[in-house]
Image (cartoon, rainbow, N blue to C red):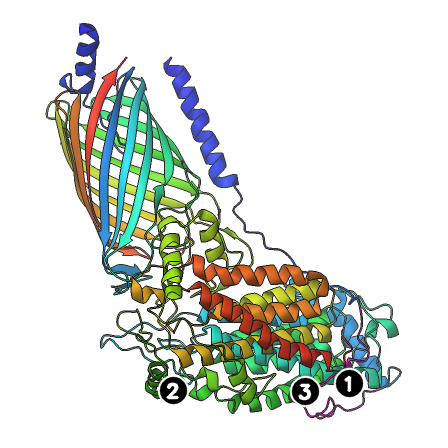
Amino acid sequence: MKKLIITLIAACGLAGTANAQMPQDAIYMSKRTACVALMYGSSSWNTYWEHHLKRENLNIGTHTTQSLSLMGTVGISNRLNLIVNVPYIKTSTSAGNLLGQQGFQDVSGWLKYKAFNRNGFSIHGLIGASLPMSKYVPDFMPMSIGMQCRTASGRLLVSYKHPKSGAYVTTHGTLTWRSNISVDRDAYKAGDKVYNTNQVNVPNTFDVAARIGVLRKTWQTEVWAEHGSCLSGDYIARNDMPFPTNNMMSTAVGWYGKYQPHHFGINARVGHVVSGMNAGQSTSYMVGLLYLFNW
Amino acid sequence: MKLKFNYIIAVGLFTLAAGLYSCDKTITEPQRVGYTPANVDDKAGSWKTYILASPTEVSVAAPASVSSAEYLTELAALKQASASLTQEQQEAVVYWGAGAVYRWNEIARELAARYNIPPASNADGKYPVPDANNPLADPKFPFANPPYTARALAYLSVAQYDALVSAWSYKYKFKRQAPSKTDATIRVALPVSSIPTYPSEDAVVAAASFTILKAMFPGEVPFLEAKYNEHKQSRLWAGMNVGSDITAGNDLGLAVAAKVMGRARTDGMSAANNQTVTSGMIETAKAMGLSEVWLSQESPARPPMLPNYGAVQTWNFDKAALVKLRPGPPPALNSTEYQQNIDELKSIQKNQTREQARIANYWADGAGSYTPPGHWHRTAANASHEARYSEVRMARTLALVGTTLQDAGISCWDVKYYYYYPRPQQFGLKTSVGLPNFPSYTSGHSTFSGAASAVLGYIFPDRAAEFSTQANEASVSRIYGLIHYRFDCEVGLKVGKNVGQYAIDRGKADGSGL
């Protein structure tokens, strides 16, 4: 038992391998350790980009998406981690009469593999996938909690960490394939065309990000910039509502931090969208409770 | 161990990469192809027209005989035009070959969907009115809401029908057979029927449809012109019509549609958005005992949609019948009946099932869609296609359905503004489909659906139960979407069926024997 606890502490932080739960860092859980995170997040916007036009909408006021996520990271080996996330989502508006939606959204999983690691420089390959967990309505936007896509992602992540100071810089790029979806209606307009089917083509996406921070035995602090965009898609017509076929794009900046002295830890994240297209200018925050164990 | 993991990752990445590039995301839609009509309707030239005083009000010159030198020259030109087609020409032939009336109805629905977006408010909190003389400015003209779309599609269908009845009368007068029957070496790309080809029904429909739609969607003239020209050309590429078939059909279609547009200019639509009438309407409703009148729930408050549309000219009955169609009043807002109805909505809001949401979404036909009238036109066009109707019989179906849909809209708008009854949202309800900006009683969806399903049930008796079920579902969908009380829907559906009866009576007396 004593040995177990020592191993656990060593893995979780004190030995310098502070873990995280995220598929966007270069940090790994050691073999036979796992970390569970319960995270609450809230993201709000009161302006959005209708194609390129930045506007407010008095019939929405402030749109808020709240989420409660349970995330687990398992060290399959010292260089292969499995990350699984289950989110419950709830949407609401401060004005107008659109009915808020809530439910379990999409379960997602990532396999993260450290392919190369020398003198603080490391290269990682990640593959991810997600599946809808409930039959939520995907095209009652912006109130829908998700888009009902099945997704598959490939990500390349490159990181350098100064061995002594713990200062690091990380960058990554991702391609995500998104499946077509079915909607409740059997005809819809996308672009200028009416499609006489219930099948909707949802564009694939890519994202890139850069992170600079310091990772120490018990804590981590980081500033980040992320850009995500669809690879194709149409746009929100003048005064129209969004639709899953839209080419959504946003660039956000923010901060992430974590403190985990022992088994228990906390993490937090704030972000703000600085530019976008067919998307809300959201400000978001997240706080999480972490617990680490091994076997 | 390391090797094994490398192997797993390599395989994983490869699978993913393969998945990314091989997963076909092409959307497949049901394809419609051409057919030989089940019945050529050789007597359709005497069917009763809507606007034309008689099927021969517009005259068509007798064609050259099939043995004339002039015709032989045309045949030679046709042979050349249809001998070898580019990919694009082949696609055009197949597209238009599905049916002239069918395709133009589909095009009109697509335009309705593109233009069915409410204008945005400006910086002063006002809603600019779309301007027909500047159709592509913001806001675009028209705002193709349900009443507007019902009218546009009604005129389209009536123009197609009158022009085709006229065309049929000349076809069977002159009896010039299809070019490929005179010269068997002409390559035809579509099924050839025994229907005489002078004047061309395709050219008739293309010209009539183009004339109506460019008036209804003035910002789309280049788009429509390209369709119009391609449609006519496609008949030459397909080896189906010689040039004089097309020219005669084109001239006939233009002339008939011009007469139909004469009615459109004086039917009262230009005064449908007269907002000054609302104060009198509100007074009337209050005098009848309504304690709280309808108020726009939008911010800033939006003027109600087309408050004077109830005064627009109807197709299948007169003003006296319109008043007679008006149902009794809705329950008083302080009555037990009202309380039960709003309680039902509150309970659905709390526990809306996925099936209720599905029904509400399926029939929503809200902003950015071709509206409920478009939905029923689609049903009517598909049913006619599946029954292999001739062009003229399909046009008759769509004219009966199209006119009853506009009649239903006029009747429903008359009722809505007569009673000026508040929406459930005025008392705290939300919506899962979006809230239309006009009074609650009665439901437009229900009235449209009651009328269209009744007429379709008359035309396709074997499918009457199916259309009736669809209408009931469309009606109740507005309760599930939380924007209508049950009495709005039940009364609307009933009035709609009564509206439909007038079109059925017309259909029974139009000389078709159908």
Chain-order first, disc 3 or disc 2:
3
Judge the density around disc 2: few (<14), some (14-19), many (≥20) Cα neighbours within 10 Å: some
Q: Going by the image, does B493 lie left or right of B49?
A: left
> Mark 1, mark 3: which one is toward the viewer?
1
Chain-order first, disc 1 or disc 2:
1
**What residue is shown with label 2?**
B274
Magenta segment includes B44: yes
Q: Going by the image, does A2 lie left or right of B336?
A: left
Instruction: Check the image and name the residue furthest to the left.
Output: A165
The chain letter for the residue carrying disc 1 is B
Mark 1 and 2 residues: CB-CB less than 8 Å, in contact?
A: no
**What residue is shown with label 1?**
B46
The chain letter for the residue carrying disc 3 is B
Q: Quadrant of residue A24?
A: top left
Please provide the residue range marked out in magenta.
Answer: B39-64
Q: Quadrant of residue B380?
A: bottom right
Q: Give residue A62's position: percent from left, percent from top.
A: 23, 57
Q: Residue at x 73, y 68 (%)?
A: B389
Magenta segment's dominant SS is loop
Please tell me whether residue B198 is drawn above or below residue A50 in the rendered image: below
Instruction: Check the image and name the residue furthest to the front.
Output: B336
Viewer-side residue, A183 vs B287: B287
Please tell me whether residue B432 is drawn above or below residue B443 in the rendered image: above
The tag on residue A38 is: none
The chain letter for the residue carrying disc 2 is B
Q: Residue at x 30, y 69 (%)?
A: B297
Please tell me whether residue A252 is drawn above or below residue A213 in the rendered image: below
Amino acid at the residue labelled 2: Asn
Amino acid at the residue labelled 3: Asp
Please tell me whether residue B34 is drawn above or below residue B101 in the rendered image: above
Viewer-side residue, A159 vs B280: B280
